[in-house]
Image: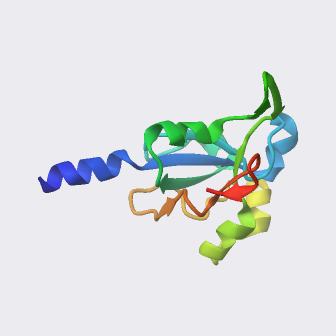
Amino acid sequence: MAVLSEQKRLSEIWEVAIRHADHARKSKTQEGDIILVRRPLGFFGSSEQGEFIWLKMFGLPDKDMQELVAPIMTEDLIVEKRRYVVRFKELKKIISNMRLESIRDGSKKYQPLGIRPESPLFDVRGLVYDKQLMRVL
């Protein structure tokens, strides 16, 4: 039974890519926008390392985790490319040694934590901000 419980726990973990400010003009996304949510692979390519901050997150059912990459829409019109964001100033409160200037400079390929098996897990609730509803999840 302990194995099933461990498998269930691991199935609730997601790797989340968060946009660097450095690339915001190219893709019309903004600093901190959640760009990708995927099941753990445990690695990322060098271009992914320069474009995104990677965090391991949990806390929402699968369907809701996938919604973290949704745009802001009014009727059938996309108003903003991404609805959900991790604000770097809030993240810095949790990761005190995080260097904001290095995050904003994508050429440094700076990853404050990475997505190694021993990397800490972050609860989506309380960290992810909904720009449409103007509140933290």
Residue nearest the observer in this picture, 125 or 119: 125
Q: Quadrant of residue 104?
A: bottom right
Report which quarter residue 72 is drawn in: top right
Front residue of this view, candidates 130 and 101: 130
**Residue name at image x 66 percent, y 75 percent:** 93
Residue placed at 40% from the left, 63% from the top?
118
* Residue 104 in view: yes
Evaluate whether residue 95 shows in this view: no
x, y percent for residue 31: 79, 52
Q: Position of residue 41 (x, y in %)?
A: 43, 42
> Measuring 77% from the left and 31% from the top, which residue is drawn there?
73
Using the image as rendered, state which of residue 42 and residue 70 is in the foreground. 70
Q: Residue furthest top?
A: 76
The spot of residue 91 in percent (x, y) is: 66, 67
Q: Residue furthest left?
A: 1
Q: Nearer the viewer, residue 68 or 13?
A: 68
26 relative to 113, above or below: above
Q: Residue at x 74, y 68 (%)?
A: 89
Q: Quadrant of residue 45?
A: top right
Among all residues in the image, which is located at the extreme bottom? 96
| Colour scheme shown | rainbow
* Position of residue 136 measured from the top left corner of the image (x, y, whole percent): 66, 59
Q: Is 126 left or right of 62, judged from the image as shown?
A: right
